[in-house]
Amino acid sequence: MATLNESQGRKAAKGRTKKTAPRVDLTAMVDLMFLLTTFFMLTTSLGSLNAADVAKPDETDGILVDYPASRTMTILLGKNSQSVCYMGTTAGADMKVVAVKNIQEEISANELKVAKTHANNPAKYMIVIIKPTATSKFKDFVDLIDEMKIAGIKSYAIDDDHITSEESGFMESKGM
């Protein structure tokens, strides 16, 4: 009993009793976090792949399918993010050197010309032929495919096998 009275005397001498700090039990919060994580993992759909449609011109017994010159735009990719574009065939074509980042303006302008020419027939839309050369970079090719999607071009083809001598001559003269 003496020990009990001594401990009571010490508390009285100090004048205060020691209070323990309140503890927060986070067990329920951890359980809730795992439940929410599991819920969102099971209900969320994973990202789907966005693949671009790529078509190359059909060849039948070595004969290349001819595209209508009045509504066909050809874009040749060169080095230093430069491209050459023209409407129609290479014979008498007005070939222009355009930066790949500015190709959207050319596509829009030519699309308006095709729309005016074939206004009575909406089935006749612009066709774009993309011709990457050996000096072009893959990044420019991907950027150009993105521009096709942005511009809403319904039909475009990749043709790296049939670069004419007029096209390669023009590109060489421009240092591309």
Image: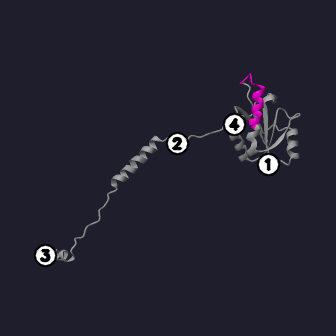
Q: Which residue is mark 2?
A: 46
Main SS, magenta residues: helix
Residue 79 in the image, given as x and y percentages of width and height: 79, 48
Q: Quadrant of residue 163?
A: top right
Q: Quadrant of the N terminus?
A: bottom left
Please tell me which residue is depicted at 43% across the width and 48% down the height of the picture. Answer: 37
Q: Secondary structure at mark 3?
A: helix
Label 4 or label 1, whichever comes before in sequence order: 1
Residue occupied by mark 3: 5
Left or right position of 109 against 10: right
Would residue 2 be found to the left or right of residue 76 on screen?
Answer: left
Q: Amino acid at mark 2?
A: Leu
User: Which of the two marks, 2 or 4, is nearer to us in this view?
Assistant: 4
Label 1, on which residue? 79
Q: In the visual, does 145 lie left or right of 8?
A: right
In this view, the mark in front (3 or 2): 3
Q: Determine if residue 61 is in view.
A: no
